[in-house]
Amino acid sequence: MSIESAKWATALASLGHVVRTVAGAGVADRMIPSLAIDATSSTSINEVGDALGDADLVIVENLASLPLNLDAREVLYHALDGRRALFHHHDLPWQRPHLAHLEGPRDAPLWHHVTINELSRLELLARGIDAVTMMNSFDCEPPRGRRDSTRAALDVDDRSLVLMPTRAIPRKNVEGALAMCEALDAVFWLLGPAEDGYGATLQRLIESSNVDVRRDLPEGCDVHDAYAACDLVVMPSTWEGFGNPVLESVTHRRPLALYPYPVACEIVDFGFRFFDLGDVVAIKSFLDNPDYDLYAHNLAIALEHFNISSLPSHLSSLLDSIGVR
């Protein structure tokens, strides 16, 4: 179950709804391994139907949006025939060049759709599917995190530390982050692994740069420690369905260097103050003399528009709109 799924489940439970989670991997109330992305066995409609039971509403998290398990998607569609369902779309197949040939989400009279950005909502509308947009939400409370001990474990001394809290695949634009770090003479910390066969390319990029690189989390550290330890967060991606590190930089009170991928522009339009990935002069000036008013400015916007404490009321309004009490 994804992080966003868990947030929704918690918020719905806080409203008094009985929530049962079903997933192919991770942690859930009911596990059906054949629903996983890399499943090697076929999904049973009887097993899926039994897991859904007498639920008044089935919320589908991305399974039919970015159909990486085609068999599971087809079985799910059959299991939802005549049932009320809400599809929570994080990504859509035509937004990924290597998946653009796949069928997009389907619709039916009792089915409803939520996107995490306006771009996807408009793209669905152009294909005849009405949806509403609910952007991701975040814990805006003062974050925990151990700065000094984490930096010591990374052996970065008093050098500027730039955190890229994502995995490494082509669209994450690691080369853009490395170029910025080289210009800043900063240590680059890539938190996530290389995936989708990108390992050799990543190694070549690192070896051909003049940047001091750190990989992964030191033992005993977590992502909050990573944000606390860094001096700057970098989000160089050319495409994201949302891009949670953008808001996580805000909630962890850190500056952000950002490549203007399409959905990032939607987020920036709320009034956030971020740095352009290529504006090394402005970034260096801030790192030398931080303006703490920037953190307060960005946090105020996050509290108003992206606060997880508002998620229950947003979901309550959504359920009212589709006739679920």
Image (cartoon, helix red, strand yellow):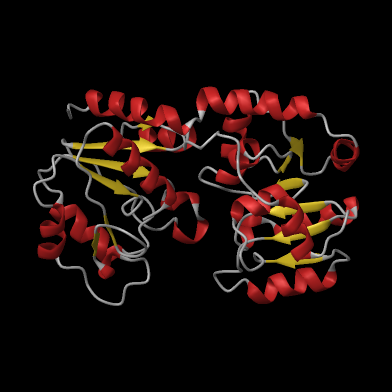
The residue at the point 70 percent across, 70 percent down is 202
Do we see residue 235 in this rendering?
Answer: no
User: Residue 193 at what x, y percent from top left?
Assistant: 60, 67
Q: Quadrant of residue 214?
A: bottom right
Horizontal arrangement in the rendering, residue 324 relative to residue 178 (left or right) = left
Task: Pick the quarter of the image with the C terminus.
Answer: top left
Relative to 39, residue 12 above or below: above
Residue at 18%, 40% (x, y): give it: 57
User: Which of these two is toward me, 232 or 239?
Assistant: 232
Along the line of sight, the residue nearer the viewer: 81 or 137 = 137
- Could you tell me residue 99's position as x and y percent? 44, 59
Would you place residue 155 above or below residue 313 in this image? below
Q: Position of residue 88 (x, y in %)?
A: 34, 42
- Where is 226 relative to 262, above or below? below
> Residue 70, relative to residue 250: is it above or below?
below
Across the whole image, how many numbered discs are drawn on residues? Answer: 0
The residue depicted at 57 percent of the width and 31 percent of the height is: 266
In the drawing, does residue 210 fall left or right of residue 198? right
Residue 39: x and y in percent read 32, 72
| Quadrant placement of the N terminus | bottom left
In this view, the residue in front, 132 or 31, is 31
Give the side of residue 83 with respect to residue 194, left or right. left
Q: Is residue 316 at all visible to an observer of this figure? A: yes
Q: Residue at x 25, y 63 (%)?
A: 72
Residue 149 left/right relative to 237: right
